[in-house]
Image (spheres, helix red, strand yellow):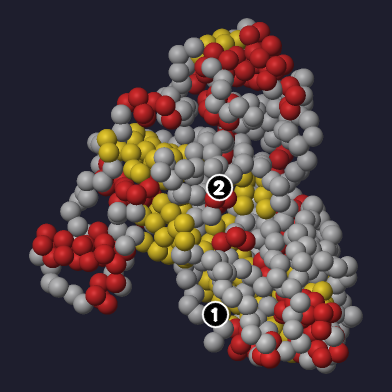
C-alpha cells in the first residue's frame, strides 16, 4: 500500500483532478461535483492540460494533443487494442520545463511525481553543449593513465561484467539557485527544485573496470570525461571510484534515455550531478586532480568569508514539499496530506519534520519504506487544515545528524552570493482562500 | 541474458573458488561486489587500448603541465583568432554578450567578494585558480559550434590573449607547455578544500 492509498486519496491529486476535470468537460461535470477528487484545484489559468502557470523562468506547455472522447461508462463498451509501447493517459501530461535547451537545464515536474522513482522521460536534464547522439555499436569506454593495461570496453563488454543495480538520486548542485536568488510566489516545486531525479540504475562497478586495467600505485584520482560536445570532464577521488561508483547502461529497466547519457554514464551515488559524467568515453587514472573548469571556475562555492569551497562533491541533506504547493489550491478545511521528497548524499534520511506554522512547531513525518541510501525518500504528514493562513515547511535530517538549515542560517553562513548546494528549508504559504504560494 | 550470466558465474565460482553451492535465491541476493570476490581478479574483458587510440581522446592538461602539447602563442597572435572565433559570443573585448559569459575583468577586487554578491561576474582574471585550466577548457570546448577544432598554436594564442587582457601576464608573454604552468592566478589563494563530513553545525 503506498502513501496515497494509505491516506485514501488519489495518487496524484493535482493531475488526477485535472484529468477528471477534463473528463468532466467531456462527459458532463455534474457527475464529479462534491467528490473528494476535485478537492484540489489547479489555479488559475491553466486552460491546456499540462500547461504550467506562468511565473519564474520560461515555461513551456506540453503540446496539446487531441484528447480522446471518454465514454460515459467505459464498462459498457469494449476498450481499445494494445500497441507496441504503452503511453500515458492523454489526460496526464507532465512535462519537463523549460525545453529546447542545449546549454542549460530542463527541470523535473516534482509535483507530478508519486512515490520515489522519477519516470525516465521526466528525469531532469542538464546539458553543456547539447544531447550527444551515440551509436551503441561504436561506443567505447577507454580506461588508461596510471594502469598496467590500458583497455577499451565496448558496450557489449561492459554488459558482460557482473551487473549491479541500485536506486539513487542525481541532483545538479545548482538546484534551487533561482529560488534562492530570485524567489517568486508563483514558483512550482519543479521551478524551485526540479534539478533532482531518482532512478533505479543498472551497470558495472568502476572498481571492476579498474581491476581489469590494474591501477598503479600513486593513482589517487580518476579523470572522467564525456563524449559530448562539451567533453565534460571531472576529477573523481580514487576512493569514491573504488567504493560505489558505477557505469550505468540502464535506467529504470531499460537502456539509458539519450539525454541522460545513452549508452553509458558514470554514477557517483550522493555526489553532485555534474560529476556523474554522461556519455562517458574515458576514465584516466591520475595522480592529482585535473582542475578542469567544472571543478574550479564552476561548481565551487564562494562563501561569505571571502573564500571559495572546492571539491564540495557530496550533496547535503535536503527536502521539499511537493504537495500542497503552487499552483494547487486547497478547496476547503479538513485533512490534507503534506507530502514531498527528502534526500542526502551522506547516506540515509533519518527523519523528516514538517511544520505548518512557519517553523514554530515541528512534527515527524511518515517515511515510505524502504528508505534507501543516497536516494529520494518520500515523506508524508497528514494535516488537518483549519482554513486559516499557514506556512508549510519540511526539514530533513540524515544519518550523520546533519539538519537541513533554515533559509536565514543558510544565507548567514554561506552568503547571499553563494553559487551551489542550495539546500535551505523551503516554505509554502497557504492563504485563507486555499491558494498556495512559494514563500522562499 | 542476465539469468544466463548468473548461472555461468555460479558454475565458474564453484569451479574456481571451490565455494559451496548455494541456492539460486541466495545467490541472487549477493551484491555484485561480493560476487566479484568469487571470480578471478580479472575477467579478461576489454581490448588493449593503443597509444594512437588513447592519444586521439587524451586531451586534458593539468596544473603541472602534463598533457600540454607542443606549440606556442602570444597575445598579438591571439587578437585575430579571438576576433574571428570568439568575439561574436563573448564580445570584442571579452566583456560578454547576452547569455555568453564575460571573460575579462582586469580590475582588482577587494577581498574576493563573490560569496557576498552574486552579481559580480566570475572571470578568468578574478576567479579561475589555475592557468592550465584555460588551455584545457578552450581547447576542449571552443569554439562552441566547433569544439576541438582549435590547433595547439591557436589555443596558446587565445590563452595568452585571455591572460594578458586580464593583466595576469605581460602583453608580450609567450604561452607554451613550459610557461603556462608557471603562471600564478590571483584567485588561487582563496580556494579551500571542502572538509565537511555531515553532522552539525551547518557550514
Above or below residue B105? Residue B14 is below
The residue wearing badge 2 is A274
The reply, left or right, for residue A221 in relation to residue A424 is left
Instruction: From the top left corner, tell me how far across and down residue B146 is, in percent.
Output: 60, 27
The residue wearing badge 1 is A368
The quarter of the picture where the C terminus of chain B appears is: bottom right
Residue B164, by quadrant, is top right
Residue nearest the viewer, comparing B17 with B131: B17
Report the residue at 73% width, 33% height from top: B100
Report the residue at 33% width, 39% height from top: A152
Report the residue at 32% width, 26% height from top: B51
Q: Residues within 10 Å of mark 2 (few under 14, many from 20)?
A: many
Report the residue at 31% width, 62% height from top: B1
Above or below residue A18? Residue B159 is above
Residue nearest the viewer, comparing B102 with B19: B19
Instruction: From the top left corner, tell me how far across and down residue A59 is, in percent.
Output: 79, 56
Amino acid at each position: 500500500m503506498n502513501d496515497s492509498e494509505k491516506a485514501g486519496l488519489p495518487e496524484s491529486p493535482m493531475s488526477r483532478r485535472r484529468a477528471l476535470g477534463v473528463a468532466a468537460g467531456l462527459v458532463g461535470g455534474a457527475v464529479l461535483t462534491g467528490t473528494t477528487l476535485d478537492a484540489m484545484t489547479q489555479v488559475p489559468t491553466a486552460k491546456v492540460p499540462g500547461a504550467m502557470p506562468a511565473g519564474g523562468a520560461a515555461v513551456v506547455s506540453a503540446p496539446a494533443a487531441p484528447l480522446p472522447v471518454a465514454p460515459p461508462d467505459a464498462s459498457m463498451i469494449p476498450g481499445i487494442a494494445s500497441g507496441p509501447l504503452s503511453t500515458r493517459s492523454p489526460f496526464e501530461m507532465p512535462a519537463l520545463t523549460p525545453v529546447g535547451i542545449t546549454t542549460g537545464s530542463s527541470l523535473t515536474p516534482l509535483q507530478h511525481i508519486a512515490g520515489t522513482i522519477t519516470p525516465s522521460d521526466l528525469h531532469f536534464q542538464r546539458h553543456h553543449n547539447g544531447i550527444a547522439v551515440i551509436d551503441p555499436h561504436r561506443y567505447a569506454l577507454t580506461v588508461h593513465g596510471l594502469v598496467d593495461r590500458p583497455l577499451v570496453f565496448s558496450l557489449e563488454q561492459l554488459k558482460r561484467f557482473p551487473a549491479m543495480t541500485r536506486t539513487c538520486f542525481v541532483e545538479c548542485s545548482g538546484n534551487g539557485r533561482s529560488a534562492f536568488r530570485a524567489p517568486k510566489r508563483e514558483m512550482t516545486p519543479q521551478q524551485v527544485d526540479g534539478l533532482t531525479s531518482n532512478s533505479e540504475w543498472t551497470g558495472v562497478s568502476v572498481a571492476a573496470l579498474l581491476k581489469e586495467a590494474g591501477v598503479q600505485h600513486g593513482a589517487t584520482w580518476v579523470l572522467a570525461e564525456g563524449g559530448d560536445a562539451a567533453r565534460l570532464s571531472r576529477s573523481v577521488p580514487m576512493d569514491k571510484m573504488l567504493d560505489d561508483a558505477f557505469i550505468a547502461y540502464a535506467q529504470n529497466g531499460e537502456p539509458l534515455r539519450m539525454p541522460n547519457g545513452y549508452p553509458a554514464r558514470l554514477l557517483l551515488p550522493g555526489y553532485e550531478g555534474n560529476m556523474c559524467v554522461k556519455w562517458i568515453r574515458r576514465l584516466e587514472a591520475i595522480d592529482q586532480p585535473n582542475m578542469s573548469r567544472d571543478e574550479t571556475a564552476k561548481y565551487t562555492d564562494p562563501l561569505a568569508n571571502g573564500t571559495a569551497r572546492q571539491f564540495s562533491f557530496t550533496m547535503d541533506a535536503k527536502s521539499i514539499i511537493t504537495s500542497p504547493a503552487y499552483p494547487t489550491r486547497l478547496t476547503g478545511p479538513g485533512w490534507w496530506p503534506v507530502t514531498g521528497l527528502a534526500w542526502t548524499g551522506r547516506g540515509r534520511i533519518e527523519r523528516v519534520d514538517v511544520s505548518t506554522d512557519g517553523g514554530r512547531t515541528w512534527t515527524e513525518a511518515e517515511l515510505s519504506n524502504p528508505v534507501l541510501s543516497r536516494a529520494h525518500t518520500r515523506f508524508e504528514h497528514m494535516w488537518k487544515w483549519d482554513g486559516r493562513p499557514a506556512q508549510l515547511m519540511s526539514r530533513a535530517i540524515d544519518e550523520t545528524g546533519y539538519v537541513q538549515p533554515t533559509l536565514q542560517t543558510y544565507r548567514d553562513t554561506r552568503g547571499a552570493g553563494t553559487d551551489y548546494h542550495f539546500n535551505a528549508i523551503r516554505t509554502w504559504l497557504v492563504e485563507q482562500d486555499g491558494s498556495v504560494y512559494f514563500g522562499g | 541474458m542476465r539469468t544466463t550470466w548468473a548461472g555461468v558465474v555460479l558454475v565458474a565460482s564453484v569451479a574456481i573458488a571451490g565455494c559451496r553451492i548455494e541456492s539460486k535465491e541466495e545467490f541472487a541476493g549477493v551484491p555484485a561486489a561480493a560476487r566479484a570476490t568469487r571470480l578471478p581478479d580479472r575477467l579478461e574483458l576489454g581490448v588493449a587500448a593503443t597509444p594512437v587510440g588513447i592519444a586521439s581522446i587524451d586531451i586534458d592538461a593539468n596544473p603541472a603541465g602534463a598533457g600540454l602539447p607542443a606549440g606556442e602563442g602570444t597575445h598579438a597572435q591571439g587578437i585575430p583568432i579571438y576576433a574571428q572565433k570568439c568575439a561574436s559570443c563573448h564580445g570584442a573585448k571579452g566583456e560578454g554578450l547576452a547569455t555568453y559569459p564575460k571573460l575579462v575583468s582586469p580590475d582588482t577586487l577587494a577581498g574576493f567578494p563573490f560569496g557576498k554578491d552574486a552579481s559580480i561576474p566570475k572571470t578568468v582574471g578574478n576567479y579561475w585558480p589555475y592557468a592550465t585550466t584555460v588551455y584545457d577548457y578552450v581547447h576542449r570546448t571552443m569554439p562552441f559550434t566547433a569544439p576541438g577544432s582549435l590547433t595547439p598554436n591557436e589555443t596558446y594564442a587565445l590563452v595568452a590573449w585571455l591572460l594578458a587582457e586580464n593583466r595576469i601576464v605581460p602583453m608580450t608573454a609567450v604561452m607554451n607547455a613550459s610557461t603556462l604552468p608557471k603562471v600564478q592566478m590571483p584567485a588561487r589563494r582563496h580556494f579551500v578544500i571542502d572538509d565537511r563530513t555531515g553532522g552539525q553545525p551547518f557550514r
